Amino acid sequence: AQSVTQLGSHVSVSEGALVLLRCNYSSSVPPYLFWYVQYPNQGLQLLLKYTSAATLVKGINGFEAEFKKSETSFHLTKPSAHMSDAAEYFCAVSVDTGRRALTFGSGTRLQVQP
Amino acid sequence: GAVVSQHPSRVICKSGTSVKIECRSLDFQATTMFWYRQFPKQSLMLMATSNEGSKATYEQGVEKDKFLINHASLTLSTLTVTSAHPEDSSFYICSARTGGDTQYFGPGTRLTVL
């Protein structure tokens, strides 16, 4: 079975500052890793995904994440936060077998201060 | 592309009644659809996985007779909450997968049981 741990349920940054949201995973087989963003009362939007190709993955809205197998991490970063980035962010893992169901982390709420 | 819709977006019902939620993939055929439940300020918990024309696979602890899932076609899955009670109040989100590794999420349905 696979699992995801997101360190920090709340992260607050100033507008223009670096955004770093942490995600560590556990999987007995090579994982697929995802970051999703959720705005209030909405579904999830895919930011980016890692599926065993390049370890540095670029996504939408200026976000990127780096897969580090040695650290079992897939941290999400953005060089300069924007007010519109305030949302809930979920890291998720799946594997390339069976149902390929997603297992989600507990989420990190990002606040952006003006 | 890859748009998933849900209907209704919000529903309020009386205790003991049944509620049906539809999930549609608008511009692709979904080999697999997933149903998630999200409590306030919490992560998404997978309830069940459905494949077109076959019985849904429920996660441990999810009552099959209470949460009826029908995947009638490659673009439509329905979740019926039978004999709803206040504890069933939640945000229900569906997702659809084409056969690749990415799930596309619907906007969610807010169910309130009085």
Image (cartoon, coloured by chain):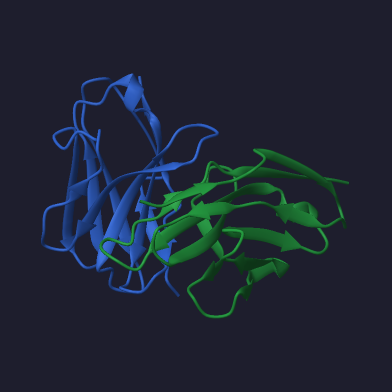
Chain colours: A green, B blue
Give residue A55's position: percent from left, percent from top: 60, 75
In depth, the one of B12 and B40 nearer the eye is B40
Q: Position of residue A60 (x, y in %)?
A: 64, 70
Q: Is residue A89 above or below residue B101?
A: above
Residue B46 figure quarter? top left
For residue A47, which quarter of the picture?
bottom right
Outermost residue, bottom side: A53
x and y, in percent, of residue A50 in the image: 53, 70
Q: Quick check: A49 left or right of B2?
A: right
Nearer to us in this view, A76 or B113:
A76
Image coords of residue A79 (percent x, y):
81, 64
Residue drawn at x 41%, y 52% is: A2
- Please identify the quadrant where the N terminus of chain B is shown: bottom left
Which quadrant of the rendered structure holds the C terminus of chain B? top left
Q: Residue at x 86, y 52 (%)?
A: A15
Q: Residue at x 60, y 52 (%)?
A: A23
**Residue at the image point whose x is 51% and y is 31% from the top:** B40
Q: Is residue B82 above or below residue B53?
A: above
Apparent side of residue B27 relative to residue A89 in the rendered image (left or right): left
Say which quarter of the image contains residue B44.
Answer: top left
Q: Is residue A91 above or below residue A70?
A: above
Instruction: Give the total of numbered labels.
Output: 0
Left or right: residue B77 compared with residue B26 = left
Residue furthest front as drawn = A70
